[in-house]
Amino acid sequence: MMLEHFHILAFTHKKMDVTEVGKLHIEPDRQEVVLKEFKEKMQIDELMFLSTCNRVEFLFCTQEQVDIQFIEAFFQTLYPHHQPQQIQQFMDAVENYSGIHAIEHILQVASSIDSMIVGEREIITQVRNAFDASKAMGLTGDFIRVVMRHTVETAKRVYTETSIANKPVSVVALAYHTLRDMNISLDARVLMIGAGMTNSNMAKFLRKHGFKNFTVFNRTLSKAETLAADLKGVAFPLESLTTFDKGFDIIITCTGSEQAIITPAIYTNLLQGETTRKVVIDIAIPHDLDAEIVSSNNVTHISIDYLQKISDKNLQERSKEIVHVEQILSEAIETFLHIHKMRKVEIAMREVPNMVKDIRSAAVNEVFKREIQSLDEESREVLEKIIGYMEKKYMSMPMKLAKEIMLNS
């Protein structure tokens, strides 16, 4: 497969709202059937599908010309239920990369400098898992395999040799690190108010760290029960905050309410007369905690505003590392070009062993058959050793010479 046959069609947060990107997602249980049929119809040699919360990308190899007509057919074939207007919106937002520019792009993606949040290490796992899934479905081939191996190796080098991912920038990670640094007892009573994605992610950090005493409140009780089951805690509907009498040490709250969920009256009830210092992490927008509570109670208040300031500062620090990352990626592109040349030689020389064996067979069994039969057993053994030696040399020498020629060129 030639490098110029490698393409990437990317749909990301840079040109689309993430909700629009989500419309291109293909459910895992449908991917094998949908993508195999699509690959065949579009005459694609290799295909890899990458889908995250803010990007959907198609990596593929084809000898077809990837022009406007190809991209339009691409959408109509893969997303037949989308209306023409929707397809046109996707076409307007697509990022189209080919050849070495496609290699550069996937290296940037896996190294996180193309991410919505620079330095998020999760992307390297998402890229690797996407390749493994596509490979398991029989969609990929030798070229994408080589690309992905080099991509993952480069991304690992980026995270090892630079500080791009050292300082957390996500609000959830920052909230967790702030709480962890307080050295609070792992038996602390934790109230989780809200059971959405943010609190669910926060809960994963806390559970991994060793916290074990959780109570979950949510407007929809079933969601509270699901999160509480994961935490081995208990669940209540949101209105139970007004009567909850077990006390608390930590509140972590994130709901979609437009008004404060925790009023002074509710907070007083939750205290149950306790006067020890409490911790409240409010990562909701707008705030779930009434401002009056902070000024009139013994509480350490960690707000979304406070966390966002740290996030912005850490992002600035990460951005300084982009120069170092780009240096590594520049070297990686040169290295890939070398790898690609060597791989082309290896593929081109695959037939050499078979050709040598055919020549040997013809010489022994046809051309010199009578002469060999006239030799005594000892002479035939010596001849067999000579032919075997020559055969090995004729297999290895052309490969070595071809590689040297490619390197010199």
Image (cartoon, rainbow, N blue to C red):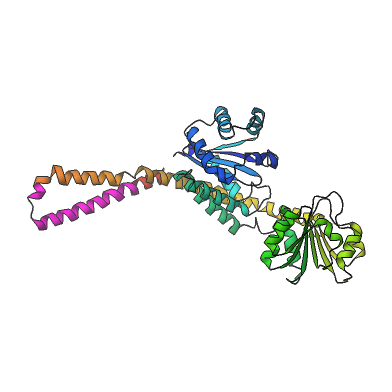
Given residues 261 and 299, the one toward you in this image is 261
Residue at left 66%, top 59%?
A: 166
Q: Residue at x 66, y 65 (%)?
A: 208
Residue 333 x/y as whole percent: 53, 46
Residue at 14% of width from left, 42% of height from top?
367
Which image quarter is the C terminus in? Answer: top left
For residue 42, say whether it is visible: no
Confirm whether the magenta stretch covers residue 397.
yes
> In the image, which residues are magenta?
371-400
Q: Is 378 displayed left or right of 89 in the figure?
A: left
Q: Quadrant of residue 241?
A: bottom right
Q: Quadrant of residue 205?
A: bottom right
Residue 242 as seen in the image, left or right of residue 28: right
When the figure is inspected, residue 225 is found, relative to residue 43, above or below; the finding is below
Q: Where residue 178 appears, x then y in whole percent?
A: 75, 63
Q: Main secondary structure of the magenta part?
A: helix
Image spot of residue 381 (x, y percent): 14, 57
In the rendered image, the quadrant that contains the N terminus is top left
Is residue 348 in view from this perspective? yes
x, y percent for residue 33: 52, 40
